[in-house]
Image: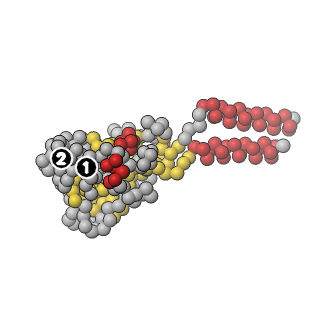
Amino acid sequence: MRKLTLTIAAVALSLAYSMSAQAASLVAGWDFSQYYADSVHSIDGGNSAAPSDIRANYSSFDPNGAGAQAAAFGVYHLPFTPVGDASEPLLPTAVPGTGSLLPNINQGPYNNFSVLTLEGQASQSDLAMVAVQTTSLVFEADLTTVPQTGSDWQITLAGATQLGTGTIQIEFSTNGSAWSQAGTISVSTSAIALSSTVQAVTSDRAFFRLTLSPSTVIDNVGITANLVTVPEPSTAALLAAGLLGLGRIGRRRRA
């Protein structure tokens, strides 16, 4: 009986664990196709400057993977207020001709313009982003509206330079104020897919701060995480009661 009790308990614990972890999901992604044109910070056909906070346009939580509903799960924060005159430190730019700026994630490539247009994205430009000078910007992923929590956070992107070599310094935070180093990546004029070190923390929000050296180009940025599902209180209580009952049965059999 003791063996049976231990076996049932092990199975129950295994089932509880299997319910708690899921495969990695693209929480939020940006392909910068919402900008109107090269060097123009605008997302409404060039009629006005873009906002300082740019919402995600791709997510695993959007029914089509791309579009308006993806905006709820991520935003990137520009280090300035765009005025549309190409004087900003970070600009939309034509994609470099060498190498690939496709994302280093399973859900890519992002730029499905037809879906984005159907869901209300005004502009469709195959653009990346270039740092005119050393620039830091923050990409935020948000699971609070699911609601859900994530672990093993990672940022994926494609990177290159317009000239020479450059670096992308990556920092991580769960609150947007306390930062830890997540690595530095070197880039060259040949565009390649990149990813950061996995951050083995559990949180419903994640922030990645990227510091780009001058002439560094990035595109197809995505934040991924393994989703962690916490059992409902009633389910957890039933599981605990069952395990407690099994333990009592085992003790009675041994008495």
Q: Position of residue 72 (x, y in %)?
A: 38, 39
Q: Say which quadrant the N terminus sits in.
A: top right
Q: State the residue at coordinates (38%, 49%).
A: 66
Q: Position of residue 44 (x, y in %)?
A: 22, 44
Q: State the residue at coordinates (20%, 47%).
A: 45
Q: Position of residue 202 (x, y in %)?
A: 48, 42
Q: Is residue 197 left or right of residue 44?
A: right
Check disc 1 and give the amino acid type: Ser
In this view, the residue in front, 185 or 216, is 216
The disc label shown at residue 104, or none: none
Q: State the residue at coordinates (38%, 44%).
A: 70
Q: Do residues under tags 2 and 1 come within 8 Å of each other at their CB atoms?
A: yes
Callout 2 secondary element: loop
Q: Position of residue 89 (x, y in %)?
A: 18, 50
In this view, the residue in front, 63 or 237, is 63
Q: Which residue is mark 1?
A: 123
Residue 3 showing in the rendered view: yes
Q: Quadrant of residue 179?
A: top left
Q: Quadrant of residue 75?
A: top left
